[in-house]
């Protein structure tokens, strides 16, 4: 919750409200698809824009998706508003893995930093996945 105090003619007026819901449109670039949410997933964020209205955030998400997909031929979505685009030729050699790894461009629409459903409401699912092993421990 947040609190706003106003003083009008010497009278204290206190307004208390719920925490404002914010939606984030996030673009990422890294070795993991955006739906994995490893503990260090925020390290791959390129941009993060916040909106207080779901419809405005949705339009920004759609614009980011179109802009990214027009430049990258491959696309895959998983869950709601978690999209990966990539170019099969955009690889990074990993010394730890001793092989090339695919790089992904992620576009996400989140609510207060968490996954959301198609209706814009927060998903009940946990954010951090541990069942997939990261390809390598090396960071940029």
Image (cartoon, rainbow, N blue to C red):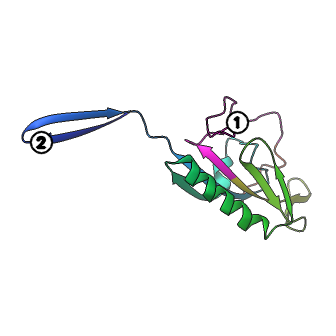
Q: Which mark is on residue 83? A: none
The answer to whether residue 113 is magenta is: yes
Q: Residue lying at the far bottom in this picture: please name it.
A: 71
Q: Residue lying at the far top in this picture: please name it.
A: 124
Is 116 left, or right, of 68 in this rendering? Answer: left
Which comes before the other along the chain, label 2 or label 1?
Answer: 2
82 vs 36, nearest the viewer: 82
Residue 122: x and y in percent read 62, 35
Magenta stretch secondary structure, dominant: loop
Give the residues in magenta. Answer: 108-133
Is 37 left, or right, of 50 in this rendering? Answer: right
User: Which picture quadrant has residue 117?
Assistant: top right
Q: Residue at x 90, y 64 (%)?
A: 88
Q: Vertically, is 135 above or below 126?
A: below
Q: Residue at x 79, y 71 (%)?
A: 71
Query: What residue is shown with label 2?
Result: 8
Mark 1 Cα within 10 Å, few/some/many (few <14, many 20+)? Answer: few
């Amino acid at each position: 919750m947040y609190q706003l105090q106003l003083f009008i003619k010497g009278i204290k007026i206190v307004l208390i409200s719920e925490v404002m819901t914010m939606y984030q449109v996030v673009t990422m670039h890294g070795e993991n698809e955006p739906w994995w949410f490893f503990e260090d997933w925020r390290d791959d964020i390129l941009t993060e824009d916040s909106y207080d209205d779901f419809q405005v955030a949705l339009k920004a998400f759609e614009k980011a998706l179109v802009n990214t997909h027009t430049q990258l031929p491959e696309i895959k979505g998983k869950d709601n508003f978690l999209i990966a685009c990539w170019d099969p030729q955009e690889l990074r050699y990993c010394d730890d893995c001793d092989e090339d790894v695919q790089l992904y461009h992620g576009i996400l629409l989140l609510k207060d930093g968490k996954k959301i459903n198609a209706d814009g409401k927060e998903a009940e699912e946990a954010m951090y996945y541990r069942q997939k092993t990261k390809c390598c421990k090396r960071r940029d």
